[in-house]
Each structure stands twice: as C-alpha cells, then as structure tokens.
Image (cartoon, rainbow, N blue to C red):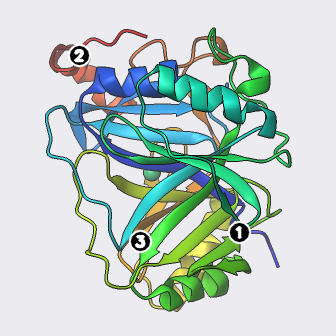
Amino acid sequence: MNTLINGLHHVTTIAGEAQRNVDFYTHILGLRLVKKTINFDAPDVYHLYYGDETGSPGTIMTFFPYGRLPRGRKGTGQLTYTAFTIPTAALGFWINRLHAQNVAVSAPQKRFDETFIRFEDFDGMGIELVTSDADARTGWATGPVEASLAVRGFHTVTLNEANPDATIRLLTEQMQHRLIAEEAGRFRLAAGNGTPGAFVDVQHSPGELRGQQGAGSVHHVAFSTDTNETQLEIRQTLEEAGYMPTEVLDRNYFESIYFREPGGVLFEIATNPPGFAADEPVATLGRDLKLPEWYEPRRAQIEAKLPALNY
Ligand code: ZN
C-alpha cells in the first residue's frame, strides 16, 4: 500500500496581536519566521508561518493574528496542546528560559516514559516541550537559542474528544495511523515512520465542555502527504468512508483538502511540495510580505491595512 500520510504537516491557530505572536515564536521559542503572507480568505489579516530553517513539514506552526479578539476556551472537539521535541539535555535550559521570559511553565511531567513541560503562548495556546533524543532533525539556531538546544519540530498534537472511538477509527482505518500506546485515557497513534512529528494523541475527555474558538485556539491541523497523487488517493478514501473533503485548494506553498473529523476538529491534508522557497530564497525566508499572484494587483491597499512587524 502506498504511504498516503507521513505524519503532521502544520498546525494553524487563531492569534491576537501580530507583534506579540512574532515575539513569542521567534524570540522566546526560537523558531524561524519562514513566511509572512496574508490569510487568503481574509486579506487584511496576516498569515504567519514559523518552523525550522526551510519550514519543513512537521515543524510548521502558523497563525492568523486577528488583533483584539476574545480568548477561546480549550475543550472537546479541539486540538488543545501542540508538543514540540527538545533534546533531553536542553530541558533545564528551556525551564530557565521560559521563567526568565515570564512564561508560567509546569513542573516536568511524565507521559509514555517521556518527560515534558507545558505552558501557553501569549494568547493561551497550549504548548508542550517533550524531551526525546530519538529526533534527528536540526533545530533553527538563533542568538539566544543555539542549535544544540533548539526546538526540533512537532512531537505530538493532542485532540480532546468526548468520544474517542470514532476519531481513532478515522485515523487508523482511513488515515494510515497505528494505535501504539494507551495511558490514562490517552490514545497515542503514529503514522509513517513513527518518530516525533508523526504522533497524534486522542485524549478521552468525558464531561469536559466543548472548546470555543477565539484567540489562542487551534483552527486546524494538517497532515503531510507526498504528492498531488497521494492527496487524491486519500481524498477518495475519505469520500468512500462518508467524509466530505473539500476540493483541492492551492495554498501557494502546498495544496490542501479539508474535512471535519467526527469529534469536530478540522483536519487538512497538505502536500509537501512546493514548500516555502517557492517564491523567495531560503536565505531570506519571511523577510518580505509575499502575496499570491491573484492579490498582487491589490498589494498597496493590503499592505496599508497590516501592522508593521519587528523581528
Ligand atoms: Zn492549513
């Protein structure tokens, strides 16, 4: 059988103020701003992408910073925590760094024999750093965060579900995931090579309120597929199982289909090509505002409405 899903591709979140978002993800977390563009469906709002040097699939955190916006609420039918990998030896560095930046961080906790810490970004989005030395990816080196300590990319996303069974069935029967572990109502599923960046945790959350969208809440999670052909193949599989994936949409840096999983989380399947170097060199990724060609004629009006960003 062809590999149709490799693991995670990106996570997209609703944010508040753009500058605070840039400060958190570049300065504090040390990711690279790899693309500064607009929300293709709402061109007066940025779409900011952060990741490793090139924005590799499985490292990409993206945001729509809407400005002043009430906070969302974590709950069922939502992706509640996005976990990134750090090297085991970097744990103390990150605890100290987050404290020094006035980010409230949990004590180290254990899950599936791995240690992690938990905190929130300035808008309340849930983040975890999981220690793992099984992650061979290279992090983005910045002034305060050298390469040996840097965040490597995604480890896991956690979906809170009132009824986990239907979501687990979708992931295992249509989306090529395997159930690999269970602990305290948390079901870990793995895709592809089963390394960090290819994990989804379905957290059984009985009695929890449904999540509410707002600043700090995740809009959707995207899974990675290799080509347009594998994307059409998974699309057909989903349709045959009764899901209603969208047509293929051109997102400039990947092509996408979207559908809602049974618990309510919006899923996307995104192609790995063409990637973020499609319209600017790797060396200067994220420096200039990039627009899809159909918005270029309106560049002046669009730029005038967007806040200036320092980074
Ligand atoms: Zn997306």
Using residue 144 as the reference point, say whether residue 210 is left or right of it: left
Distance between mark 2 and mark 1 Cα atoms:
38 Å
Residue furthest out toward the front: 107
Counting every numbered tag in the picture gives: 3
* Image coordinates for residue 161, horizontal then vertical, percent: 42, 78
Q: Are marks 3 and 2 in contact (CB under 8 Å)?
A: no
Which residue is label 1 attached to? 4
Toward the viewer: 278 or 293? 278
Please state which amino acid type lies under the numbered disc 1: Leu
What kind of element bears circle 1?
loop
Residue at the image position 54 percent from the left and 75 percent from the top: 202
Q: In this rendering, does residue 226 appear at all? A: no
Using residue 298 as the reference point, say whether residue 35 is left or right of it: right
Please state which amino acid type lies under the numbered disc 2: Glu
Residue at the image position 49 percent from the left and 85 percent from the top: 164
* Image coordinates for residue 94, horizontal then vertical, percent: 62, 30
What kind of element bears circle 3?
strand
